[in-house]
C-alpha cells in the first residue's frame, strides 16, 4: 500500500511502502527472545541461557534449539551487531535445548572486548564498545531455518584509561542484572478487565510493570574527556500476540524516565478464544526478562 | 573568442576535455570557447539556461543533464561524473575551491546563476592548472557588474515554490561596480504541512540560504582588483518514531562555508596576462544521527587558506606559455562519536532502514592538509595539430594530531609527512578536416585524504595521497549545418583509494586502509541539433561501468553509484514570447546488495539483514519526461517571466530505493516524484 499523498503539489513527495505483518504478530514459530543469567559474565563464567520461542499455538519448548558460540570478530566494515560470518559459517554447537548452560570463553575479552587479541604483527584494534560501554560475546541460535543472535554482556574492565580511572571505574561499576517483569493488566476504557475475559473487537489498554530495580545506574567511560559519565538504563518492552493488533510493537522508557510501567493499545480480535501474548523486557546493557500469557477473548 | 549559441551546445561540448563553457552573460546564455579549443559558432538559437526543464533556472542543476553525469538519486544532490565519487570532483569559483556545488538535498546549487558568467564541467582529462581531485572539475566564474557604457544597473527577483532569490548589480565609478546575489529556501516550511509524516521521516527537506557579493575596483585600463565573497548555509532535520528508546530515529545535518578572496587581474599590452587571488575561508559540517540505540555524531570545522597565481604569455603566434601556482591549506578540527560505520561510505553494505549497529567510540583530533602545486603549460600549433602539454608538481603536507587512540595519560603524538607527486598532462587536437576534429587528453591526478578520515579510532592517521590516470579520446563531427555528433571514449584508473579495512583483526589505528583500486570506463555519444533558429537541443547517451576493489586480491565489484546507461534528450523551442522546453531522461538503476535472509538480534529485539553478493542487483530503470513553458512579458524596463514546469509528465512510479519490512522478509519499493507542477515567477530589470 502506498501512503504518499499524491495531491502534494511540490517536489519530493516520495511514496513510502507499508508491507508485511508487524513483527508483533506471531503467525509462525519464531524465536522472539533469549536471556543469559547472570546478565553480565566474566571470561570463564558459566552462564545459564533460556530461550523464548513463540508459535500460534503458544510457547514452544524448543528442545531442538542449537546454541553456538561465535568467536569471529566483526570487521569494521560491517554495519551489523555481529560478523556476518557468525550467521553464515558452520559453528561448533555449544549446547542444545530451550535452556542450556555454556561457559564463557576465556578469550572473550580479547576477541570481543577492549583488549585486542595477541598478534605477531603489532597491536591490533580492540572491539568498539556500545553506547553503554559494553562488550558482548555472541551466540548463534538455530531452530530449523530460523536464526537469532544472543549477545552476552562481558565484564572486561576498562581499556584506554589511566590506572586511577580504572580503579574508580571498578569501584563504581556494578555488573548488569536482568530486569524483572512483574505484572500485566488490562483496561477497557478506564475499567480494569480480567485477562481471562477480554471483550472481542475492542481497543484494550494493556499495562505491564517491572520491578523498581530493573533500571540500574552505571558509569560509562568517555575516552575523549577521560571521565566517567553516569547513566541509567533505559527499558523497552517488545509485545507479541497471536491475534489482534498492537498500536506499537515496542514501548518503553528512556533513561531519564523513572516510571516502572508501560502500556500499549491492543485491538482484540473479533473471534472469541484464547490468544497467546508474550512480553520481552530489555534494558540498555543487554539484560532481558520475558513472560508468557494466555488471554481469553469472549464475545 | 566568444560565440553565441545555446546552452545546449555547452552541454554537449562539456563532455570533452577543456571545451565547453556554459555561460550566463547578463541574462543571456552563451557558449564561450575555451582557450584550448575552438567551439565556434554553434548556430543554435538562444534558449536560456533557465529554460531547461527540471533545473528551475539553476546553472548548477543544469549540469546534471550533461552527458557523463549520473542521474542523482532523490534528495541526493551529488555530482557523479564518469563514475567518480562526488568527493572526487572539485568545484572552483573564481579560483577558490568550495566544498560542494549543491545545497543539502541537491535542490539548488550554492551560487546564484545570476552571479555567474560561466559554468564549466570537465569530466576528466583537464590540464595542470587544477588538481586535488581524482574525478571531474566544475569551474564557476562570476560575471562582471554592469558598466556605465551599457547599463548602470540591473537586477532580478525570482520566486517559486522552492525559494526566493535576487541578483542586483550597479556600476560604480569608472569601470568599477558591485554585484550581489542571494537565495533563501523555504520548501521545508511549506512541506511540513503538506506531506505525510512517513514521507517527512524518510526524506529530510533542507533549509538553505546563500549569498554572493563582488566589488570591482578598476585601477586603470586592463588592470583591476576584485573582492569576492561567497557564503552558503544548510540545515536539515528529520525525526521519526520516538515511542521507545529502541526505535527512535533522528537525523540532523548542517553544513556551511564562506570564502573571501581578493583577485588581482592584469592584462599587458603584448598580450600576456597575470592574475593572483589570495583567499580565506571557513567550513563547518555537522551530522548527528540516532537510530534505536545506535548513534553517530560528527563535527568538522575547518579554516581554509588559499593562494592562486597565474601568468600567461604568447611567445610566438604559434606558442603560448602559462606559468602558475595553486596552493591550499586546510586546518580542521574534528569531533566524532558513535558507530564507526555511520555515516556509511562507498563500499559499505547496508540496507535502507537497517538499524544502526556497531560501537560507540569517540575521538577528537585535528588535521592539517596542505597542497602547493607549481605548474606550467604550453600550447603550440603545428599545422593541423595543437599540442597542450602541462606539468603540475603536487606537494602534499598531511599532519594529523594523533597517531594512536587516546589512552590514559599517554601524551598525544601526532605525525607529519610531506610528499611530492608529479602530475603530467597532455592534450592533443587534430583538425582532420573542416567537419572533423579529433581530441586526445590524458593525465595523472592526485587527491589528499579527507580530514575526517585521519582519526586513529574511526580512520587511519597514516593515510596518504590517492592517484588516478585519465585517458579521454573523442571526435567532433559536423553533419551538415545543423547537426553535430561527438563520440567520446574515456578510461579512468584509480589506486591507493581509501576504503574500510576488511580484516576481522585490523591493526590499531587502521580502520581505513589505502588499498582501494578503481576503474571507470565507457563511451558517450552526443547528437547536437539546431535545424531552425528557434529549435535546438541534444540527445546524449552514455554507456559506462565503474568498479572498485581492494588491492589485496579481491575481484572488482560495481561502484555504489554506477549507472550503466544514461540517456538524455533536451529540446527547446521559442515562438511568440513563449519558450517551451522538454527533457527526457532514462537511466539504469544504481546497484544494491540483496538481502537473502535475516536474524533476530535478541539483545535489542531488532531484526538484522543477511546480505548476498555485494551490489549484485540494481534498482529498476528510471525514466521521466519533463516539460517547461515560460512566457515573457516585456514592459519598458522590466521583463516579467512566469513559468511552469511539469515534472514526470507520464506519472511514472520510478523506484528510488528498496525498502524492507521489520523482519527483512519482504521487499518493496520507495518511489519518487509523481507528476508534479512547479510554478515560478522571474522579474528582471
Image (cartoon, helix red, strand yellow):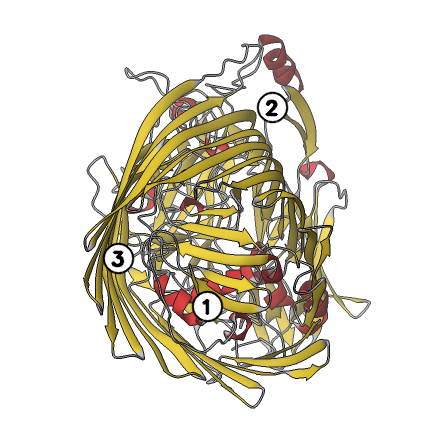
- Inspect this view and state whether residue B352 appears: no
Residue ranking furthest to the right: A190
Q: Is residue B518 above or below residue B323?
A: below
> Crowding near pointer 1: few (<14 within 10 Å), some, many (20+)?
some
Residue B66's quadrant in the figure? bottom left
Q: Which residue is mark 3?
A: B545
Residue ranking furthest to the front: B269
Q: Report how far apart the C-alphas of labels 3 and 2 lie in the structure.
A: 43 Å
> Could you tell me which quadrant the C terminus of chain B lies in?
bottom right
Identify the mark at residue A27; answer none if there is no mark: 1
Q: Report how far apart the C-alphas of labels 2 and 1 lie in the structure.
A: 47 Å
Residue ranking furthest to the bottom: B576
Q: Which residue is mark 2?
A: A224
Are dots 3 and 2 in contact, CB under 8 Å?
no
The disc numbered 1 marks a residue on which chain?
A
> Crowding near pointer 3: few (<14 within 10 Å), some, many (20+)?
many
- Inspect this view and state whether residue B28 appears: yes
Where residue B612 sits: x, y (%)? 30, 54
Residue drawn at x 23%, y 48% as measured from the top left? B556
The disc numbered 2 marks a residue on which chain?
A
The mark nearer the N terminus, 2 or 1, is 1
The answer as to whether the residues below labels 2 and 1 share one chain is: yes
Amino acid at each position: 500500500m502506498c501512503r504518499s499523498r499524491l495531491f502534494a503539489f511540490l517536489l519530493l513527495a516520495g511514496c513510502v511502502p507499508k508491507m508485511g505483518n508487524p513483527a508483533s504478530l506471531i503467525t509462525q514459530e519464531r524465536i522472539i527472545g533469549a536471556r543469559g543469567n547472570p546478565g553480565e559474565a566474566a571470561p570463564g563464567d558459566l552462564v545459564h541461557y533460556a530461550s523464548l520461542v513463540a508459535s500460534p499455538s503458544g510457547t514452544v519448548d524448543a528442545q531442538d534449539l542449537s546454541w553456538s558460540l561465535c568467536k569471529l570478530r566483526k570487521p569494521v566494515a560491517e554495519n551489523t551487531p555481529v560478523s556476518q560470518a557468525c550467521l553464515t559459517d558452520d559453528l561448533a554447537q555449544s549446547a542444545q535445548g530451550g535452556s542450556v548452560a555454556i561457559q564463557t570463553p576465556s578469550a572473550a575479552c580479547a576477541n570481543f572486548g577492549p583488549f585486542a587479541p595477541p598478534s605477531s604483527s603489532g597491536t591490533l584494534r580492540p572491539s568498539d564498545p556500545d553506547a553503554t560501554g559494553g562488550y558482548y560475546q555472541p551466540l548463534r541460535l538455530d531452530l530449523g531455518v530460523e536464526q537469532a543472535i544472543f549477545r552476552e554482556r562481558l565484564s572486561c574492565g576498562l581499556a584506554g584509561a589511566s590506572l586511577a580511572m580504572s580503579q574508580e571505574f571498578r569501584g563504581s561499576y556494578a555488573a548488569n542484572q536482568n530486569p524483572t517483569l512483574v505484572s500485566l493488566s488490562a483496561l477497557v476504557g478506564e475499567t480494569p478487565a480480567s485477562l481471562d475475559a477480554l471483550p472481542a473487537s475492542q481497543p484494550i489498554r494493556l499495562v505491564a510493570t517491572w520491578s523498581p530495580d530493573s533500571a540500574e545506574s552505571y558509569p560509562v567511560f568517555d575516552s575523549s574527556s577521560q571521565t566517567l559519565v553516569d547513566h541509567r538504563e533505559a527499558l523497552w518492552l517488545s509485545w507479541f500476540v497471536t491475534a489482534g493488533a498492537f498500536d506499537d510493537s515496542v514501548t518503553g522508557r528512556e533513561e531519564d524516565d523513572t516510571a516502572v510501567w508501560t502500556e500499549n493499545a491492543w485491538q482484540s480480535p473479533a473471534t472469541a478464544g484464547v490468544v497467546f501474548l508474550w512480553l520481552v523486557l530489555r534494558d540498555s546493557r543487554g539484560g532481558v526478562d520475558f513472560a508468557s500469557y494466555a488471554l481469553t477473548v469472549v464475545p | 573568442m566568444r560565440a553565441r549559441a545555446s546552452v545546449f551546445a555547452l552541454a554537449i561540448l562539456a563532455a570533452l576535455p577543456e571545451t565547453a563553457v556554459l555561460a550566463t552573460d547578463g541574462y543571456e546564455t552563451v557558449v564561450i570557447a575555451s582557450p584550448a579549443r575552438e567551439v565556434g559558432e554553434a548556430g543554435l538559437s538562444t534558449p536560456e539556461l533557465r529554460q531547461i526543464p527540471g533545473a528551475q533556472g539553476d546553472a548548477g542543476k543544469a549540469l546534471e543533464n550533461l552527458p557523463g553525469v549520473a542521474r542523482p538519486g532523490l534528495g541526493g544532490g551529488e555530482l557523479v561524473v564518469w563514475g567518480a565519487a562526488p568527493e572526487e570532483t572539485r568545484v572552483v569559483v573564481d579560483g577558490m575551491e568550495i566544498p560542494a556545488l549543491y545545497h543539502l538535498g541537491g535542490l539548488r546549487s550554492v551560487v546564484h546563476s545570476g552571479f555567474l558568467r560561466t559554468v564549466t564541467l570537465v569530466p576528466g582529462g583537464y590540464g595542470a592548472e587544477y588538481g586535488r581531485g581524482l574525478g571531474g572539475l566544475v569551474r564557476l566564474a562570476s560575471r562582471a557588474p554592469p558598466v556605465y557604457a551599457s547599463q548602470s544597473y540591473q537586477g532580478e527577483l525570482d520566486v517559486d515554490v522552492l525559494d526566493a532569490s535576487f541578483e542586483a548589480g550597479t556600476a560604480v565609478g569608472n569601470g568599477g561596480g558591485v554585484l550581489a546575489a542571494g537565495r533563501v529556501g523555504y520548501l521545508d516550511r511549506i512541506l511540513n504541512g503538506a506531506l505525510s509524516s512517513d514521507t517527512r521521516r524518510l526524506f529530510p527537506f533542507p533549509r538553505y540560504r546563500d549569498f554572493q557579493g563582488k566589488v570591482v575596483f578598476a585601477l586603470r585600463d586592463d588592470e583591476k582588483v576584485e573582492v569576492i565573497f561567497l557564503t552558503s548555509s544548510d540545515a536539515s532535520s528529520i525525526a521519526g518514531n520516538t515511542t521507545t528508546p529502541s526505535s527512535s530515529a533522528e537525523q540532523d545535518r548542517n553544513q556551511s562555508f564562506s570564502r573571501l578572496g581578493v583577485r588581482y587581474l592584469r592584462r599587458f599590452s603584448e598580450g600576456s596576462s597575470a592574475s593572483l587571488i589570495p583567499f580565506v575561508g571557513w567550513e563547518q559540517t555537522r551530522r548527528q544521527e540516532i537510530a534505536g540505540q545506535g548513534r553517530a555524531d560528527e563535527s568538522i570545522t575547518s579554516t581554509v587558506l588559499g593562494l592562486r597565481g597565474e601568468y600567461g604569455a604568447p611567445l610566438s603566434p604559434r606558442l603560448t606559455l602559462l606559468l602558475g601556482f595553486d596552493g591550499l591549506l586546510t586546518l580542521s578540527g574534528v569531533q566524532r562519536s558513535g558507530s564507526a560505520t555511520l555515516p556509511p561510505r562507498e563500499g559499505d553494505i547496508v540496507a535502507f532502514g537497517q538499524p544502526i549497529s556497531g560501537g560507540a567510540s569517540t575521538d577528537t583530533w585535528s588535521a592539517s592538509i596542505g597542497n602547493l602545486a607549481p605548474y606550467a603549460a604550453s600550447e603550440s600549433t603545428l599545422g593541423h595539430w595543437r599540442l597542450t602539454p602541462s606539468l603540475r608538481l603536487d606537494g602534499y603536507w598531511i599532519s594529523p594530531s594523533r597517531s594512536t587512540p587516546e589512552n590514559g595519560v599517554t601524551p598525544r603524538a601526532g605525525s607529519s609527512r610531506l610528499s611530492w607527486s608529479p602530475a603530467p598532462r597532455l592534450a592533443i587536437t587534430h583538425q582532420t578536416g573542416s567537419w572533423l576534429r579529433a581530441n586526445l587528453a590524458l593525465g595523472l591526478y592526485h587527491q589528499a585524504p579527507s580530514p575526517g578520515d585521519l582519526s586513529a579510532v574511526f580512520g587511519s592517521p597514516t593515510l596518504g595521497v590517492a592517484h588516478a590516470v585519465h585517458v579521454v579520446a573523442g571526435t567532433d563531427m559536423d553533419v551538415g549545418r545543423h547537426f553535430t555528433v561527438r563520440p567520446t571514449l574515456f578510461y579512468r584508473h584509480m589506486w591507493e583509494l581509501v576504503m574500510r579495512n576488511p580484516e576481522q583483526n585490523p591493526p590499531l589505528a587502521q580502520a581505513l586502509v589505502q588499498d582501494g583500486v578503481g576503474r571507470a570506463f565507457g563511451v558517450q555519444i552526443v547528437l547536437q541539433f539546431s535545424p531552425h533558429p528557434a529549435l535546438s537541443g541534444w540527445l546524449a547517451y552514455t554507456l559506462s561501468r565503474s568498479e572498485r576493489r581492494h588491492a589485496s586480491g579481491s575481484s572488482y565489484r560495481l561502484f555504489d553509484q554506477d549507472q550503466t546507461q544514461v540517456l538524455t534528450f533536451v529540446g527547446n523551442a521559442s515562438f511568440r514570447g513563449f519558450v517551451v522546453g522538454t527533457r527526457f531522461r532514462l537511466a539504469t538503476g544504481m546497484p544494491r546488495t540483496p538481502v537473502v535472509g535475516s536474524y533476530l538480534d535478541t539483545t535489542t529485539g531488532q531484526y538484522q539483514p543477511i546480505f548476498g553478493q555485494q551490489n549484485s542487483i540494481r534498482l529498476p530503470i528510471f525514466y521521466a519526461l519533463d516539460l517547461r513553458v515560460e512566457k515573457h512579458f516585456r514592459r519598458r524596463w522590466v521583463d516579467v517571466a512566469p513559468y511552469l514546469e511539469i515534472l514526470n509528465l507520464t506519472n511514472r512510479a520510478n523506484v528510488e530505493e528498496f525498502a524492507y519490512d521489520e523482519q527483512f522478509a519482504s521487499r518493496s519499493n520507495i518511489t519518487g516524484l509523481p507528476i508534479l507542477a512547479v510554478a515560478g515567477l522571474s522579474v528582471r530589470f
